Structure formats: structure tokens, C-alpha cells
Amino acid sequence: MLKKVLIANRGEIAVRVIRTCREMGVATVAVYSELDRDALHVRLADEAYALGGQTTAESYLNTEAILDAIEKSGADAVHPGYGFFSENTDFARAITERGVTFIGPPPEAIEVMGDKISSRHAAERAGVSGVPGRSEVLTSPDEVVAFGNEFGWPVAIKAAYGGGGRGMKVVQGPAEAADALESAMREALSHFGRDECYLERYLAWPRHIEMQIISDTHGHTLWLGERDCSAQRRHQKLVEESPAPDFPDDVRRAMGEASVKVAEACGYVNVGTVEFLYQEGEFFFLEMNTRLQVEHPVTELVTGLDLVEWQLRVASGEPLGFGQDDVRRDGHAIEVRINAENPAEGAFTPSPGTITRFVTPGGPGVRLDSGYASGDTVSPYYDNLIAKLVVWGHNRESARKRMLRAIEETVIKGVATTLPADVAILSHPDFANAKHSTNWVEQSLDLSGVSTDVSAPAVEPVADGGEPVAKVLREVTAEVDGRRYQVRLWVPDLGDPVVVTGGGGSTARANAGPKRPKAASAGSGSGTVAVPMQGTIVKVLVDVGDAVEVGQTVCVLEAMKMENNVNAEKGGTVKEVKVKAGDAVGPGDVIALIE
């Protein structure tokens, strides 16, 4: 069995891996950026090492820094989590070439399946049909236009080395092709380190069904059951469940067997997911994710298996010890993702900030996987997933009602979350009757009036009498040669540098800078264009003197690994542009003036 595992990731997946390792008696090593110095995964790990930097490129995508942490810690294995380097062949090879175990598939399998284009070829060789598409890397918007004109619009541009909806753009017609390809390549490069993209036909009303598989080093590959992940926005999942509702058992078995064929065709080992689109009785291979999925807990709740435990056991060379007929699926599980986003009016606007209060739900059949606690900050530099709330019930309806009860018990203040949208989804007759698709949230679900209360609790004023201050015993974080230590020191009791600034529980830090101007509200007709959140300007679409219309996009802002359009609320002429591509901006920063 492995002795010490370094988790090359952050947030709830790092916490998830640490907890199973602790139960198995395996030591854990965390890595962290400057912004994650006091993050939950760092606090829970046995050891932690600084990667430096703030952005993903400077930290969690810094191969040399991670390899240095492996050497310093003496870790004999690396768990990549999901995202970042989890499907990066070069990273997996860099690990294995040092004699360190990579808790995932062989680099060769990642090379075949991590590239969505070559995975389509592999599936075809295994006799599994994919979504009709173009299995070559896009080099020009003209190729998008030619494909759409031949096979029909809309079409989907996808990141070849991506997943989770990142780097995916739906193109409605020829006029959108150039901007969509440029945007998809930017997102892919930012999130996965590579910008190659390819094309697929965009199905009008499909369901997203994926099959969990597991393979050991002794030639055994099993399918553990499916998950329905059709409730999505921006092609990213919001609600997942297992088993898939209103799903024929013969199709389930055929999909499971097809998943095994795809896995065996690339010599797969460890846990993986084969994804399909299902429409009108047919299923099409979509891609294979060569890693643990965000939604793996729903499979764990219906099978009783700890998938992280089996990842470690398989990586240690153990056989599975059970066969296909031994896999049991009991009851129904539902997961909702709690993202730091404001779903108001269906916008799903990123909402970074500090979580001032976090009350978690409990009771029978309720599980919450989180990478945050009260007082932690959700940074705009990383993915906005705060937590995953998962419930189990004897059947789908009992699980649906249990989830609604668990959401009602959940309290998160300081940032907006997707929980109100989750309630709207779970309460809708279309979802209750399994009549939804991957396009349902954005095309059919009415989210008008949906809002999130982000107000912070009141904070007591800080006393400043000028008298000598007593000392208190506190835990302090220190770094020695890049390794993180927790030490206890007697320090002056200076209290929390927070002062009350007004009624209603509003607060401000004592060292806060000048207040930024607020963004104009929708429909106000303001000529001041301001950004609603912290992020980075990736593209400016107007120049001084340009005529703009109401609702026209002025710039594209990247926040929390998503691109967001900042639009004009007033028609007129651009008087001033205050930003350029690459500029960092904060909430309320004015980027342009229109007169």
C-alpha cells in the first residue's frame, strides 16, 4: 500500500482525497498557492508545501514547483484530483519517470483519451459510435463555417484537452464562428494549458449520461453504473443523479458494455468515466474523462464503494476482488453543485469573496463535500465550486425531497451561490418527471426573481483604548524552506482588524482602500460601464468614437475560469476606454464611458 500521497490540487477534491487517505492510514501532502495559504485542504493535510504565485499558471500548473514539493516531502504517490494536471500526459510521465506512483491511468491511456480527438478514433476502433463531428484540430474559423453549412447549425466547438464544459462554445451561425473559436481557445489554454479545439454536431435536446468504470492492473474492467448530468448551464453540470431516470435497462447495459470496450481499447487502469449523449433511444460516445469526476459521490452512495479508496488500491497493484455481477446499485442519489455564482435572471455571474457564514446540513442520507469553511475566501483565480451537496433516498422522489430539505438547512453568506437555482430545478415538474435535457436550464427554466442573499453577519467593533494589550495563545502559520508548519505562539491580543461602519451589519476592514464605484444597475441607462466582479480583461471590443447599442458587449472579462460579457446599458458613442487586454479589475471598476 502507498505510504504518502501528495495531492496536486486544491479545494473540495483535495479535502476529499485527504479524508480517505486518513481513514486508510496513508500520510498526505498538500500544495498551495499564495492565495490558498490557509485553505481547508492545507489545514487538514499532514504536510503542506508552498508553490508560490497566485494564478493557476504560477501555482497549480507549475510542474517544477510540484515536482520540487514531491522531492522535499518524500511522497511516493501523486493524486491529481480533477482539472489542472489530472489529464495531462506530460505531467503523468514526469511523475512516473521519477519512480513516483501516479494515481490514475498510464500516461499512454491519458494520451489517447485525454485528447478528445484521438479518443473519438479509439472509440470508433472499439465499435462505439461518437457524436458526428470533425476529428481534426481546428486551424481557422473557416472550417467551422464549412462544417456548419454542410451539417447544419448550431455546431459545438470543444477543447481537445478539456472537459467540464470549459472551452466549449455553441456557434449558432457563420457570423459567430471567429469570436467563438477565439474564446474557446482562450478558455482551453487558461484552464488546461493547451488551446487545441475540434468540432461536433450540436444535438438539440439530448441527455448527458455517463458511465463510471474501474480497471485494475490484472485485466479486470467493470462498469459501476451511470449518472444523469443533464441539468447544466454554460455546458457545465449543476445537478447529477444516479441511476438515470426513465432510462431503459437494456440501454443501460449496452452503454456499460460499450464503456468497458472503450476503456480496454486504450489499456485503461484506475477509475474513469465514459460520457455519452442520449437522445431518442440512441447513445453517442462523447468523451472519456481519465480521472475522478466531480460527481463521483452519487455513484458511491448507490454502490457503497469508496472510489478514492479503490483508486489508491488499484494504484498499489491490488486486484479489484469483485466482478461485474457483484456490483450492486441501491436506491437513488442526487448531487447539487454549490458554486459561487449569482443565478439571478439566469445570468450565473461569478461571485468571488469571503464566506462570512457557512452552516452545513445534516440528517439521514445527507453528505456535504466542501473545500471551504466560514472565513475562507473564494478567489476569482480558481474554479468557483464551493461544495457538493449529495443525498441518498430509497427512490428518486424521496431523494429529490431530501435534497430540497437539505438545501433549506444550508446557509452561506458573503458570496452568492447557485443554491436558489438548484431549488428551482429540483422543484420544476420537468425535472421531477425527467423531461429535461442539457439545454433545458438555459432554454426553458424560468429563473426570473431568483436571488441570493449575500449579506454578512454583524461584527463587533474593535476596542482601541491605548492600554497595554494582553497576550493570547494563537496558532500561527510559518514556512521553512518552502514547507508549511503550524506553530503555537503567545502574541498580543489585537483582536480582528474589522470596524463597524454603519447599521444593518455592514462592515469594512480597517485598512480598506477607497470604495470603488458601483456598477450601474440593468436598465438604468448609465453611460458608465463597470465590471460586476473581480477578474482579468481578456478582450476589449470597442474603441473611442465607436457607436454602441444597448446590450452590446464592450469587453470580455475572465473570472473564476469563465468568460463573461460586460455589456453597455446605454446606447451612444464611446467617450473613453479605461482598460486593455490583460488588465486586472475589481468589482465596480469603470472600464468605459458612453455619451
Image: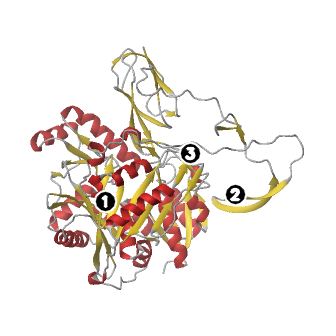
Q: Residue furthest bottom?
A: 321
In the rendered view, tell whether residue 26 sits above or below residue 352: below
Q: Residue at x 69, y 57 (%)?
A: 477
Q: CA distance from mark 3 to mark 2?
A: 28 Å
Q: Earlier in the sequence, mark 3 or mark 2?
A: 3
Which disc, if any, is residue 427?
none
Residue behind mark 1: 114
Disc 2 residue type?
Ala
Q: Residue at x 55, y 74 (%)?
A: 22
**Can residue 570 be seen by looking at this rendering?**
yes
Q: Earlier in the sequence, mark 1 or mark 3?
A: 1
- Left or right of 13, for residue 253: left
Disc 3 residue type?
Gly
Residue 171 position in % (x across, y down)? 23, 39
Q: CA distance from mark 1 to mark 3?
A: 37 Å
Residue behind mark 2: 478
In the rendered view, tell whether residue 224 sits above or below residue 504: below
Q: Residue furthest left?
A: 150
**Can residue 237 be seen by looking at this rendering?**
no
- Left or right of 465, for residue 199: left
Q: Which is more toward the observer, 284 or 159?
A: 284
Q: Which is more toward the observer, 106 or 493?
A: 493
Residue 54 position in % (x across, y down)? 54, 47
